[in-house]
C-alpha cells in the first residue's frame, strides 16, 4: 500500500470524483441523483469545483446519464470511460473529494474503501457505506439527502485541515482493517 499523500489536499482545488461501473443500475441511479439534485447546489456555491466521473462503460453511456451530464457547462464535468489502472491512479491523485451517492444496494461498498486507500475524503450515503465498518465523522461523512450531501462537499472543500484529518483517519482504518499483509499476519499469529 502506498503512503498517505499529505500534500494532495494542498496542491489541488478539491474537486469531486465518482468512480464506479457506469453500466450498473445502482451506480447510475445514485450518480444521476447526484447530478440532478446535489451538484447544482455545489457549483452554485463554488463554480470552480469540477466533477470527474470515471468508470467502465462496456455498453456505452446511458441516455439518462448523458442527459444529466448535458445540463452542465462542458468544462464542469470530466467523463472518463474505462480508464486503465494507471489512468485511474492519476484520477485519484488529481481529486480530493470522493462521492458515493448510492441510493440502494447490498453488500460491502468497495468503492469507498478503494477511495480511502487512495487518500480521498469520502462523502457517502448511509447505503453507500454499509458493510465497511466506517463511521460518520471519523473515516467519512454521511448524508442521505441532497441538501446535506451538498453542504458536506461545500463546507469541507473550505476546511482543508478537517478534510485531511478525516481522509487520514480513513487511510489508517484501511491499513488496520483491510491491508492484506496485516490480515494474513494476524491469522498466522493466531494459529
Image (cartoon, grey):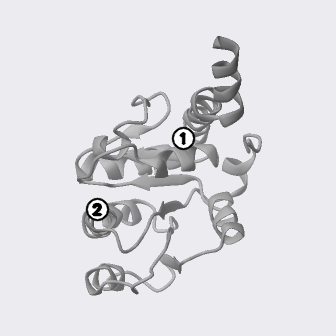
Distance between the alpha carbons at the discs numbered 2 and 1: 30 Å
Q: In x, y percent, where is residue 107?
A: 34, 44
Q: For residue 85, which numbered disc appears in the image?
A: none
Q: Nearer the viewer, residue 54 or 72?
A: 54
Given residues 10 and 8, the one toward you in this image is 8
Answer few, some or many: residues within 10 Å of disc 2's Cα (few below 14, many 20 plus, some between 14 and 19): some
Residue displayed at 40% across by 66% down = 43
Estimate the x, y position of residue 183 in percent, counting from the top left: 63, 27
Quadrant the N terminus occupies? top right
Specify the farthest residue to the top.
Answer: 190
Where is residue 41 drawn, in percent x and y?
32, 61
Please name the residue that numbered disc 2 is placed on: 26
Question: Which quarter of the figure has residue 121?
Answer: top right
- Give the residue displayed 28% in from the left and 47% down from the top: 106
Counting residues from the start of the chain, the first of labels 2 and 1 encountered is 2
Q: Residues within 10 Å of mark 1 (few under 14, many from 20)?
A: few
Q: Name the element at disc 1.
A: loop
In the rendered view, tell whether residue 127 sits above or below residue 86. Answer: above
Residue 22: x and y in percent read 40, 73
Secondary element type, mark 2? helix
Instruction: Give the quadrant of the C terminus.
Output: top right
Report the residue at 58% width, 56% height from top. 14
Q: Residue at x 34, y 86 (%)?
A: 70
Query: Residue tagged by mark 1?
Result: 159
Amino acid at each position: 500500500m502506498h503512503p498517505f499523500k499529505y500534500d494532495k489536499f494542498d496542491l489541488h482545488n478539491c474537486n469531486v470524483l465518482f468512480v464506479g461501473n457506469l453500466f450498473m443500475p445502482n451506480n447510475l441511479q445514485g450518480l444521476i441523483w447526484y447530478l440532478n439534485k446535489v451538484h447544482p447546489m455545489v457549483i452554485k456555491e463554488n463554480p470552480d469545483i469540477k466533477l470527474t466521473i470515471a468508470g467502465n462503460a462496456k455498453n456505452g453511456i446511458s441516455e439518462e446519464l448523458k442527459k444529466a451530464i448535458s445540463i452542465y457547462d462542458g468544462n464542469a464535468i470530466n467523463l472518463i470511460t474505462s480508464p486503465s489502472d494507471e489512468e485511474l491512479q492519476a484520477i485519484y491523485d488529481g481529486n480530493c473529494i470522493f462521492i458515493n451517492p448510492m441510493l440502494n444496494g447490498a453488500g460491502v461498498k468497495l468503492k469507498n474503501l478503494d477511495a480511502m486507500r487512495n487518500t480521498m475524503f469520502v462523502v457517502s450515503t448511509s447505503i453507500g457505506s454499509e458493510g465497511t465498518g466506517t463511521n460518520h465523522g471519523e473515516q467519512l461523512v454521511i448524508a442521505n439527502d441532497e441538501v446535506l450531501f451538498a453542504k458536506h462537499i461545500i463546507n469541507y472543500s473550505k476546511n482543508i485541515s478537517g478534510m485531511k484529518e478525516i481522509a487520514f483517519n480513513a487511510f489508517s482504518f484501511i491499513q488496520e482493517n483491510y491491508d492484506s499483509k496485516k490480515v494474513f499476519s494476524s491469522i498466522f499469529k493466531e494459529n
